[in-house]
Image (cartoon, rainbow, N blue to C red):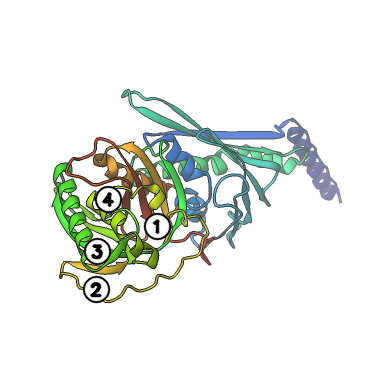
Amino acid sequence: MTRFIEFVIAFLMVVALFVIVGVFLPSHRHVEHTVETNHPIRQVYDFLNGFQRFKDWNQMRAHDPRVQYTIEGPRRGEGARLRYNSWDKRVGKGTWTITRSDEDAAIRIDVDNDDYGTDKTYQIDLEEKIGSTSVAVVNITMGYDVDYGWNLFGRYAGLYLSRNIGDDIEAGLNNIVDVLATMPNFDYSYLDIAEVTVQPMNVLHLETKSKRVIMEVYGALLMASRELIKQAEQNDLEITGPVRLVTINFGDSEYKFAVELPVGEKSAASNDDVAEEAADEEAGMDGMDEESVAPDDALMAGMAIEPVAPLPELDLPENITAQVSYGGRAIRANVEGDSPARLNIVRESLRSYAMANGLTANGYPFEDYLQEITDVIPEFGDYKVYWPIVDPDAAGAQQSQ
């Protein structure tokens, strides 16, 4: 009996000590880490402003490779939500929801799970600065905050926050830098980029190649365009849009590409205006500006793909074929007043945008030349540059396994 009483007294003393110490432990905990990357701040922001690339950097999969993810709500920005579920108790289940998104500056993520505490949030802050090598770098700071209130068990759990949550934050930030390093390092923030639906068109298609020199590329484009226009005239076809260049292989020294000319059967109305059209064709592609682009902004996001009526039987040389151009989802950049020599930078910028936003490429990039193609390389011109992607809103695209 004496020993039992001693045991009870000892137990009560431990409980009292537990309570006294717990009362003086902090009810709020904060842990943060910072890393540096030389990638543009917009690319970093897009990479983190949604959950499409979450599994590529977050440490949940390191703890449980079988953890299940479900993405809900908008794909980016406020309201984007990730639900996760794991049989591993270290991971558990819960949700991450973006509740604040300041472009190129900050992202706040609210966390709801069974871990101790309330008001659990991750705060990601981005700061662009000049690094030690006089090159612009971005500091990525990720912090975690949690309130334990009067939950003494939570306050004790907070003693280990820097070891569990803090270690995961540090590892996750390093993963972010590693994944960014696999992406094209292009700042696309100056571009007018949109995700659109491209309508397919009947085109005359000619593949060619040249040295990777702007004069030779433009010369090959000009020769191919003239040949396609000639074949359209000989087959009594109407030109329905601007010349399109499709990049097949942008090699180190050689550039392989296709030139496409949108065409269609001449309507009765167009036959009445033969003289006027002949004058336009004689001027090359003059008049094929943005207003005449075949249903380009039938390129509106979410628009259904319209079927294309087949062309009549054509008499074409072996190097030219009648095809239906790409139809489907794409990211598009409107380029105004820029040199054609810079179009590959725009293409790579679109690829950078796609990778940062978790979009999957789905074919060759292409661009529409929205001005006359002449013997003189334009110093400045207007273009619509596209990179086809897999439809992110298709059935099952919102699920990450």
- Mark 3: few/some/many CA within 10 Å (<14, 14-19, 20+): many
Q: Which residue is mark 3?
A: 232
Whichever of labels 2 and 4 marks the residue nearer the N terminus, that label is 4
Which residue is at a point 51% across and 55% down the rendered structure image?
301
Q: Please tell me in which quadrant of the rendered image residue 342 appears.
A: top left
The image position of residue 138, as x and y in percent, is: 42, 31
Categorize mark 4 by other alpha carbons within 10 Å: few (<14), some (14-19), many (20+): many
State how far apart marks 2 and 4 are (Cα). Answer: 22 Å
Q: Secondary structure at mark 1?
A: loop
Task: Give the total number of marks visible in the rendering.
Answer: 4
The front one of 183 and 325 is: 325
The three-letter amino acid code for the residue at tag 4 is Met
Name the amino acid, label 1: Ala
Q: Amino acid at mark 2?
A: Leu
The residue carrying pointer 1 sits among few (fewer than 14), some (14 to 19) or many (20 or more) residues within 10 Å by Cα, namely: many
Q: Amino acid at mark 3?
A: Ala
The label shown at residue 294 is 1
Question: Alpha carbon of mark 3 to alpha carbon of mark 4: how far?
Answer: 13 Å
In the image, residue 162 above or below residue 95: above
Between 312 and 366, the one lying in front of the other is: 312
Q: Which mark is residue 314?
A: 2
Name the front one of labels 3 and 1: 3
